[in-house]
Amino acid sequence: MVNVSSNNENQYEKLIKLFEEQLATANQQNKNLSEKLDKAIKQNEALTERLHQLTKLLFGSKTEKSKYNEPDGQVSLFEDDPSFNESEHTEEQSQQTISYTVVRKIQRKKQNDSLRNDVEVETIHHHPESTICDCCQHQMVEMGGTIVREEAKFIPAKMMKVQHIALAYECKSCKGDSSQPAQIKSGKAPQPAIQRSIASPSVLAKVIYDKFIQYLPLCRQVNEWARYGLDTNDKNLSNWVILVANDWLFPIYERMKALMMDKSILHVDETYAQIINRSDGKSGQSNAYNWVYRSVPSQGPPITLFQSSLSRARSVLENFTEGYSGTIVCDGYSAYGKLEGITFANCWAHVRRYWLKADSKNGRIGVNYCDELYRLERKFKHLSPSKRRKKRQKYSKPIVEEFLNWIETSPFFGKNALSKAAEYTLNRANGLKEFLNDGRIEIDNNPAENAIRPNVIGRKNWLFSVSEAGAKANAICLSIAETAKSNRVNFYEYIKKLLTVLPNLDIYQNPEILDQFMPWSKMIQAECSK
């Protein structure tokens, strides 16, 4: 006899088991879909944020000034200390002041252009066509004049051919005496900057000035020189710059570098460049780099040096700073670190930039922390290094610690701008604290970034260097140009002085002579100051 009840139970169990398996499969599929949906939502948020950043970068304001003094109506994160009595403008007030100033400038009547007081004056008198009186026909007498207008007159430069003639003198008295040879003396012309070249110090200084101060490429200078009467080509001009930089300006550069290596604090930055003929076998389209090194004003006359290199590797920095011991202020690039005897202080401007890109509530909070540090720095700006350190320890250090603690305890996840800002800040926490321990260290690396701007402007005009020798010459000339400018020296007059005097001095055997030709020396300040 068949047990119907038992068969039914077995079928029910199989159905239940089948349903359970299907349900488990459905749940797993639902879980997978949920995970994919969450991933797609996060990806969509990241892409939306990226699109917002790119749109803002393309169409938005390029300024890094805060638009919000107090994020979302939040009051200032820190109470003002009563020891600070000077008033401080908020960002909103600053924006209002700037806007008001701009409006006033627009409304004011445009002032006429003017000439300096030391410009030579030429007067032109305009007399009447006839000075005979129409009534009585007598000669009229001058009674005065009126200045009708003043105008600027441009006198173009002119080219001259200078012939150096060595004159010979003989003694007629000795010539008639057969007992001794006649005495002859010959004049000696000064040594040129470039042997067997038509280029004088004034021409060479003009070529270098136009390229590294006016950022005028050599190929564009050719037509200007032809207009003055000098027929040349850009290859000759390039060779002139390379020879002069290598023979006479490089010793100045090396002396500046030796003095810089004695400093205890440096600012360093780098930017890309292009060299067509490379010795490493890479394509001319590959990036080369220009590094900039700048001393701080609190440690003597400011020095700015550029270095051309084929790479951005740590070895470039290591070779340049060989024997150096001190602190380097820099950005977050990985090459800055792990060099013996060197402490690295990181830049708060870069940190602020990352939080500014986040463009959210938490992003504005991060920016506000940075703004508070900069607000304090403005108040400490004119203090001595020792007093500035004490103020930083008392007021800035708690803000830094609170900022880092806020980041560590906040749930910043993913690959969005906010999490990148948090990661960037925490990874460089030790370097960001360095400015608290030394009043001579600046809070950011803006001095180096400002120093490298002329190189960037020049790159947009020069486009590339054909050879590594040309790139090296560019670095040397830019170094001397920027150091001269920061020491208030007329660069054209300074280069002309160097190329006139140095070829006639034994600077390679007696390098100490070069100290007299540094931009801050008394002689150069007296003869070449602006």
Image: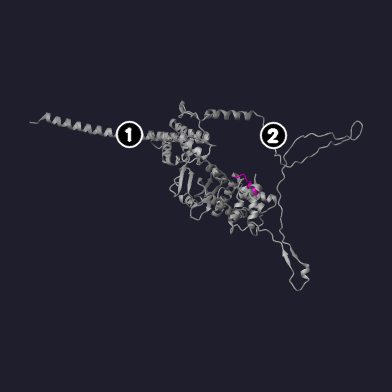
What is the x, y in percent for residue 261?
52, 50
- Name the amino acid type tagged 1: Leu
Q: Is residue 418 above or below residue 280?
A: above
Q: Residue at x 59, y 44 (%)?
A: 486
What is the x, y in percent for residue 316?
48, 51
In front of the other: 38 or 409: 409
- Name the amino acid type tagged 2: Asn
Label annotation for residue 112: 2
Q: Is residue 286 above or below residue 13?
A: below
Spatial CA span between label 1 and label 2: 72 Å
Q: Is residue 44 visible?
A: no
Q: Is residue 188 visible?
A: yes
What is the x, y in percent for residue 275?
53, 51
What is the x, y in percent for residue 501?
65, 55
Mark 2 surroundings: few (<14), some (14-19) or many (≥20) residues within 10 A: few
- The residue where tag 1 is placed is 33
Q: Quadrant of the C terminus?
A: top right
* Magenta range: 487-493
